[in-house]
Image: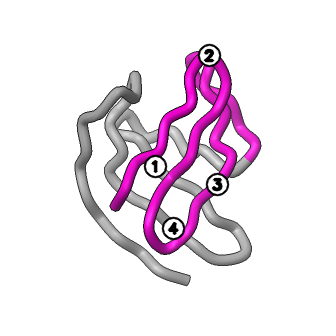
Amino acid sequence: MFDNVASTRSALPFVVVQIMTGPHAHLVTADGRRIYVGDEVDGLRLTRIDNQRLQFDGNRHIEVNW
């Protein structure tokens, strides 16, 4: 499991403050929400977390390098 604490502002409608990889990969937003792969928030579905980026699909396709 990898824990990378960072803050990013991008095209996302929320701020990511923590990213966890591994079998239970998820991210944590500034307001405390945990978003797991497959979860949808504000019209965006988190489709991938790897060691280099987050990927969202839905209303838009967004990749966030971290």
Pinpoint residue 49: horizontal percent, then vertical percent: 58, 60
- Give the spatial CA distance, label 1 vs label 2: 21 Å
Residue type (three-letter) at the residue carrying disc 2: Asn
Is 45 a magenta residue? Answer: yes
Quadrant where the C terminus sits is bottom left
- The answer to whether the residues at label 4 and label 2 have Cβ atoms under 8 Å apart is no
Marked residue nearer the N-terminal end (1 or 4): 4
The circle on residue 48 is 3
Marked residue nearer the N-terminal end (4 or 3): 4
- Give the spatial CA distance, label 4 vs label 3: 12 Å
State which mark lies toward you, 1 or 2.
2
Classify residue 66 as left or right of residue 20: left
Question: Which residue is depicted at the point 56% across and 22% down?
Answer: 60
Q: Circle 4 sits on which residue? A: 20
Marked residue nearer the N-terminal end (1 or 2): 1
- The answer to whether the residues at label 1 and label 2 have Cβ atoms under 8 Å apart is no
Residue type (three-letter) at the residue carrying disc 4: Met
Residue type (three-letter) at the residue carrying disc 1: Val
The circle on residue 28 is 1
Q: Circle 2 sits on which residue? A: 59
Mark 1 secondary-structure assignment: strand
Question: Which residue is depicted at the point 46% across and 59% down?
Answer: 53
Which of the 4 image quarters holds residue 22?
bottom right
